[in-house]
Amino acid sequence: MATQASRITGRLMLSPAVILLLLWMIVPLAMTIYFSLLRFNLLMPGTEAFAGFENYQYFFTDPSFWPALANTLTLLLGVLAITVVGGIGLAVLLDQPMWGQGIVRILVIAPFFVMPSVSALVWKNMLMNPVNGLFAALARGLGLTPVDFFADVPLASIIVIVAWQWLPFATLILLTAMQSLDQEQMEAAEMDGAGWFWRFLHLTLPHLTRAITVVVLIQTIFLLSVFAEILVTTNGGPGTASTTLTFLVYMQSMLQFDVGLGSAGGIVAVILANIVAVFLMRMIGKNLEG
Amino acid sequence: MAREVSTGRKALVTAVAWGIGLLIFFPILWTVLTSFKTEGEAVAPHPSFLFFDWTLENYETVNARSDYLLHFWNSVVIALGSTLVGLLIAIPAAWSMAFVPGRRTKDLLMWMLSTKMMPAVGVLVPIYLLARDTGLLDTRVGLVAVLTLVNLPIIVWMLYTYFKEIPGEILEAARMDGASLGSEILYVLTPMAVPGIASTLLLNVILAWNESFWTLNLTAANAAPLTAFIASYSSPEGLFYAKLSAASTMAIAPILILGWFSQKQLVRGLTFGAVK
Amino acid sequence: MGEIALSQVKKSFGGVSIIQGIDLTIADGEFVVFVGPSGCGKSTLLRLIAGLEDASSGTIAIDGRDATRLPPARRGLAMVFQSYALYPHMSVRKNIAFPLRMAGVPKAEQERKVEAAAKILNLVPYLDRRPGQLSGGQRQRVAIGRAIVREPAAFLFDEPLSNLDAALRVSMRQEISELHQTLKTTMIYVTHDQVEAMTMADKIVVLNAGRIEQVGSPIDLYRSPVNLFVAGFIGSPKMNFIEGAEAARHGAHTLGIRPEHIAVAEGGPWKGVVGISEHLGSDTFLKVEVAGVGTVNVRAGGEVALRYGDAVALAPQADKFHRFDATGKAL
């Protein structure tokens, strides 16, 4: 509701953002789709030719594709499980009265602000290194054989690193949601004789449902494009043991210079992400009504 | 009303929470401590926690290497630059959506969000080629442009949720009081929106500082920010733990401090207002 | 001067017609109240006059000058909003001075006018506080002060008292009336509360579904409502409406009688039984089930000692009946 004049001003002020984002979305995506239909290798310029769905066929039959898809999902589900369960636990804990709550919050939130390449390097060298790492020192101290994390359990190691980075995010959001829990409702349930566990199960958890969904969806968006952590620690290896879809596309287009194949992989990744995005948008869209 | 809790219970909760908090914080703490050790102590088979010869030599070494300072400066330029350009584009857009909403404003917001959900790898190749062909590859300008676009939806959304909280009647009152559109934005909206704009700036600087896909893929020697510079440490040569720690500490310290100030806004910004 | 004339003003939002052709003239110095149920279009009409919305068609003239296309800033009107709409980051002094600052009035004169307004509104001790540190009534006064300093052609009030508690509402109501006596400036006041309308207005405009139902002085509307809607809306407690045989006996489809025009009297023509009785001290409100008439609300004297279940006889004043036809128009 406003006057004609202010509506026109509004449109004018809105247009730069809209036009830029429109270009940012449409131009590269159209190019990717186009490239994905070409035989196109940067090492052999001038040999581009229309290839139909050949690249998609190659991509799906690439021996790395299925392991990469499986690794992507394992990474995603592993990190989600750790961060959601850990996040709920931490949120419940931090919501209790205690001394120095502010400081504990600061400690817990810190890993989120560490840039991915730093956290990957720190974990890789200083904690998980089989010779000089702290874990190895601890293992030796306990009389155990140190584990060579990135050789023996590469994907699990990456999951731990990524979960460490995202646990703060889940905790912070769940804690925020927890603090908006209706205290009178809790007290009413207590008056009715409900025990701690019953209240957690029937009041706290349902109240957190929305926040949990948001955490899951937003993390999914970011986790599908985890990159630096893999590049720095294992480079996708050994073999394909820690190669994800994102990393596979990166290797094909930036290391093997096969633009056509990489583009086809990129489109597959876009489609996968869109499936998640639809659910996320519904959630946030519902919130907009209010 | 907060109720009294028994001291014993409170002490127990405090102990557990502090324990877990320190455990989570430990890798960062360890990095900071290691940065003050000599290389020899850093890889000692029985690492010492606090009782070692504290030294600043790693910081001196790292700082003496001009490339470290260059990359640090790149990070500052890219994070601040992309945020400021983003704000410049987003403030008018958010103003318009919050105060002159049309029938399609909601769809527009959702669409903006959807651009953020496109996985970067899906457009890696064309962006790389476009940057290469326009000479923007490995330049700060190129990265500022890309990161501005990557984070623009988040900036617009955050500002929108903040602007939404300013009652439209106040802006109408300004109009009735004879304020032009310019005065309305300058004297009434902006002062009221300063906290929101500041938090948006803060969160976006953090996100841009840590962005690790485009910064790694679109830069080489010249424009590489700290994310890329630190990543180049991944194949170690000789004793380097202490120096790595010093470089890492310097790379994360500014953002860690900014981040602690922006905890509350972080939730709102990253959930697009879905959790408050 | 502040004469405002609306002619065939219409407004629709996306095909929905909110204001359907309003003709109205407001004389200089008049206190006019727009009253009606929520959603009747009274606030939209006020915003059209203010220039915060465009009219879809029709003209709005202020002092004989066509102002239909003028932006709000150039109409010379001042508005007091429901939420007060004070600038939270400015002190009271700066809030009141803001319109002067926008008009480029010299600093010294700004200062003088703010002081003068603050004196009228008893705001002098609060000039350096922020709106957030004031009570609801004080905020209301600041909003009025901001309007006064502009010396506008007319004041527009959009339900200004609805956020105040009942006691404060009564005293602010009187303050606004006094202000009108002092300034003698045109005031247009929107409310859904017919008590505010009756007590403050020189002229009441009753709106319903985007149309004017009736325009007149409070006592005119009370005495001779032109239709059922106005009859039911003006006056508290509400007029009783009686249909059926009793109405037909008076030659009407619907018969109206106000509760205060029915007396409890031995031998009255309406025999009934008391349902609810509310004793207020000064008055007693009775709900009486009358055979052949229906439920009738009665406003009786304060000392009437009737209780639930008592038999009672009622005597309506014959000359106070309002008669309406089947379409609701007064006969």
Image (cartoon, coloured by chain):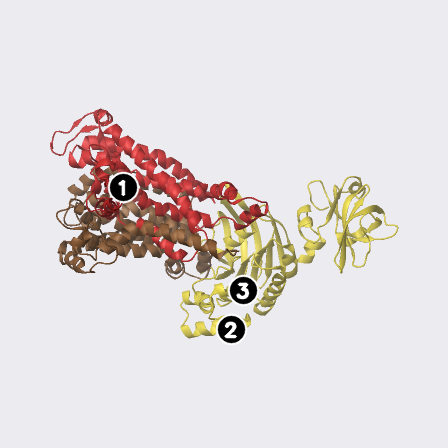
Chain colours: A red, B brown, C yellow
> Label 2: which residue?
C125
SS at circle 1: helix
Whether the residues at callouts 1 and 2 have beta carbons within 8 Å, the answer is no
Compared across the picture, whether B12 is left or right of A146 comes to right
> Label 3: which residue?
C135
Image coordinates for residue C64, horizontal then vertical, percent: 51, 59
Query: Can the viewer see residue A114 in this picture?
Result: yes
SS at circle 3: loop
Image coordinates for residue B204, horizontal then vertical, percent: 31, 51
Q: Nearer the viewer, mark 3 or mark 1?
A: 3
Q: Residue at x 57, y 53 (%)?
A: C24
> Label 1: which residue?
A24
Chain letter of mark 2 equals C
Chain letter of mark 1 equals A
Q: Nearer the viewer, residue C232 or C221?
A: C232
Compared across the picture, whether A222 is left or right of C97 comes to left
Instruction: Locate residue A61: give its quadrant.
Output: top left
Q: Nearer the viewer, residue C53 or C37?
A: C37
Instruction: Locate residue A76: give its quadrant.
Output: top left
Task: Name the N-terminal-most of marks 3 and 2.
Answer: 2
